[in-house]
Amino acid sequence: MKNGLTGPDWFESNKDEIIRLYEEVFAYNVGAGHPETLQLKQGKLLYTIINTLSQYEKQHKNGKKIEKRKFIAYSTQDWILQALLNGLGAEKKALGTTIPNFNSLIIFELVENKKKYSVKVLYKDGLKDTAMDISDAVRNCEATPCPIEKFIECCDDYKIADPKTICGAPR
């Protein structure tokens, strides 16, 4: 186990299968592979991140000072991280077949180089010392960093401005 403790004999002899089944159920619960469920789980967060980066790019491109903070942090749970990685299409590169560890994080960085804007997406596993660049695994992105035009269009089926529209809830 990750905490260094051993479990009872029945667990230890079946540990690999138990962990595999747990990770499979976890992925199902976050909506892996199901765009509408992913919209409900992480769509508003993804929408907010993409729109914020797009607004910052436009402000900077027009010679304006970015009006809001240059650093924004969202705190969330492991299942939202996994749902967000699924929405981005980068879950396999970031996680393989496992789930996010405690204290894992995703970093979105707006980069400007020679008046061209792009986005770097990094995944930091909570058990590792360094972050991994997963930009090229994001839907529609083949390069790292990902050109912002491609990043903004990466996940139209996975982001949503108002999740209530999916389930028909009153606004």
Image: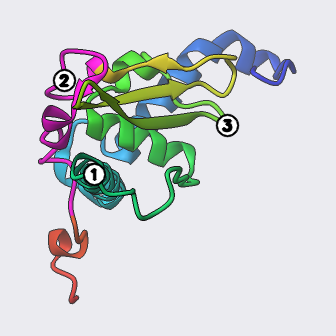
Of mark 1 and mark 2, the one earlier in the sequence is 1
- Read off the residue under disc 1: 63
- Read off the residue under disc 2: 141
Q: Taking 159 as reference, is 120 left or right?
A: right
User: Dividing the image into 4 quarters, which one contains the N terminus?
Assistant: top right
Q: CA distance from mark 1 to mark 3?
A: 36 Å
Residue occupying the far bottom of the picture: 170
Of mark 2 and mark 3, the one earlier in the sequence is 3
Amino acid type assigned to the residue bearing label 3 in the image:
Asn
The percent coordinates of residue 46 (x first, y second) are: 31, 51
Residue occupying the far right of the picture: 5
Q: Dot 3: few (<14), some (14–19), or many (≥20) neighbours within 10 Å? A: few
* Nearest to viewer (mark 1 / mark 3): 1
Residue 103 got which mark?
A: 3
Residue plotted at (38% across, 43% down): 83
Q: Which residues are magenta?
A: 136-160
Amino acid type assigned to the residue bearing label 2 in the image:
Cys
Residue plotted at (43% across, 21% down): 94
Which element type, helix, strand or loop, lies under badge 1?
A: loop
Q: Taking 48 as reference, is 94 left or right?
A: right
Residue plotted at (82% across, 24% down): 3
Residue 140 sits inside the magenta stretch? yes
Q: Quadrant of residue 64?
A: bottom left
